[in-house]
């Protein structure tokens, strides 16, 4: 028997004004998985993010205006689908994700049919990742809700460090949630409703390599309010889809 071909991997870095970090992250990813293609989706940056990414050897798609992380990832999924990649990895461009952990995510993907997502979780047994109390409460609420929906114990459902199998790429290339928080939350619900597999692995998070995190008390409280709103909308949308009657055939 001939050996199975290695999966074709696309690593997508959504980036907005990350000129100080994006080149370093690209190089770290290339060192961790040399055979992968690195794609930076420049989400309407007004600095030199695009030039820095290109100089580091990444491919770049530039959005004409800012779409948000969900919109940038939708672009990445469509590129992966068009070019027939087997795996799509999402990695933040600010340097918080340790590219050496990529192999931990890849190891959890298997050959079972159906969409799969592997989450690199910040709160799953590795070093403690500090966040404001209100934000941590919001994350716990989200994790409990999504654990019930997906029937899987999850601790970090908003992590932007993820691996997606081919079937998930095909789904998300058609419709990936682009609203704030919906990209991380509703994407898990979509995979769960499709009978897919969701898993998490503990990873180590680092401080941002540059820039300032938005973790003030006021922002954390606002995040909690947004979480409640997003959860309410996700439940409503789920019931709407479930109650929607099947299409009827047109009469001649």
Image (spheres, grey):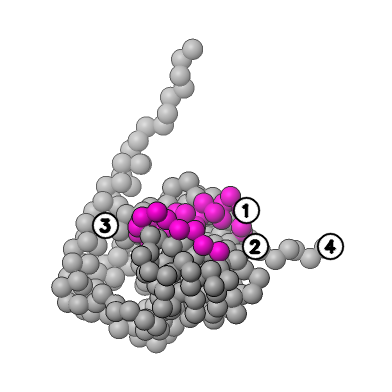
Check the picture and name the quadrant holding the N terminus. bottom right
Q: Badge 4 is on which residue?
A: 1
Q: Badge 3 is on which residue?
A: 231
What crowding class fits label 1: few (fewer than 14 Cα within 10 Å), some (14-19), or many (20 or more)?
Answer: some
For marks 3 and 4, the one nearer the N-term is: 4
Q: Badge 2 is on which residue?
A: 8
Alpha carbon separation for disc pair 2 and 1: 8 Å
For marks 4 and 2, the one nearer the N-term is: 4
Q: Which residues are magenta?
A: 59-86
* Image spot of residue 136 (x, y percent): 26, 75
| Residue 114 visible at all | no
Q: Residue at x 40, y 54 (%)?
A: 64
Q: Residue at x 75, y 63 (%)?
A: 4
Q: Badge 1 is on which residue?
A: 84
For marks 3 and 1, the one nearer the N-term is: 1
Alpha carbon separation for disc pair 3 and 1: 33 Å
Labels 2 and 1 touching (C-beta < 8 A): yes
* Image spot of residue 194 (x, y percent): 47, 50
Q: Secondary structure at mark 1?
A: loop
Q: Is residue 158 magenta?
A: no
Q: Nearer the viewer, mark 3 or mark 1?
A: 1
Quarter where residue 183 is shown = bottom left
Q: Seen from this angle, which residue lies furthest right?
A: 1
Alpha carbon separation for disc pair 2 and 3: 35 Å
Quarter where residue 125 is shown = bottom left
């Amino acid at each position: 028997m001939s050996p199975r071909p290695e999966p074709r991997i696309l690593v997508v870095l959504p980036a907005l004004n990350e000129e100080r970090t994006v080149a370093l992250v690209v190089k770290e990813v290339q060192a961790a998985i040399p055979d992968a293609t690195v794609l930076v989706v420049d989400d309407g940056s007004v600095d030199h993010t695009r030039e820095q990414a290109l100089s580091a050897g990444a491919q770049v798609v530039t959005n004409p205006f800012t779409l948000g992380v969900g919109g940038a990832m939708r672009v990445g999924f469509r590129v992966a689908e068009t070019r027939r990649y087997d795996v799509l990895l999402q990695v933040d461009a600010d340097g918080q994700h340790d590219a050496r952990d990529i192999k931990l995510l890849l190891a959890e993907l298997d050959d079972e049919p159906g969409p799969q997502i592997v989450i690199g979780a910040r709160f799953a047994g590795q070093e403690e990742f500090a966040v404001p109390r209100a934000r941590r409460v919001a994350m716990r609420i989200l994790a409990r809700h999504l654990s019930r929906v997906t029937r899987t114990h999850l601790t970090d459902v908003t992590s932007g460090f993820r691996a997606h199998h081919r079937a998930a790429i095909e789904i998300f290339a058609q419709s990936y949630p682009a609203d704030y928080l919906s990209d991380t939350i509703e994407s898990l619900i979509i995979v769960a409703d499709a009978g897919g597999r969701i898993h998490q692995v503990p990873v180590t998070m680092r401080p941002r390599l540059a820039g300032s995190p938005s973790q003030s008390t006021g922002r954390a409280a606002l995040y909690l309010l947004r979480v409640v709103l997003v959860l309410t909308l996700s439940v409503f949308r789920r019931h709407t889809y479930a109650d929607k009657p099947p299409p009827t055939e047109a009469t001649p």
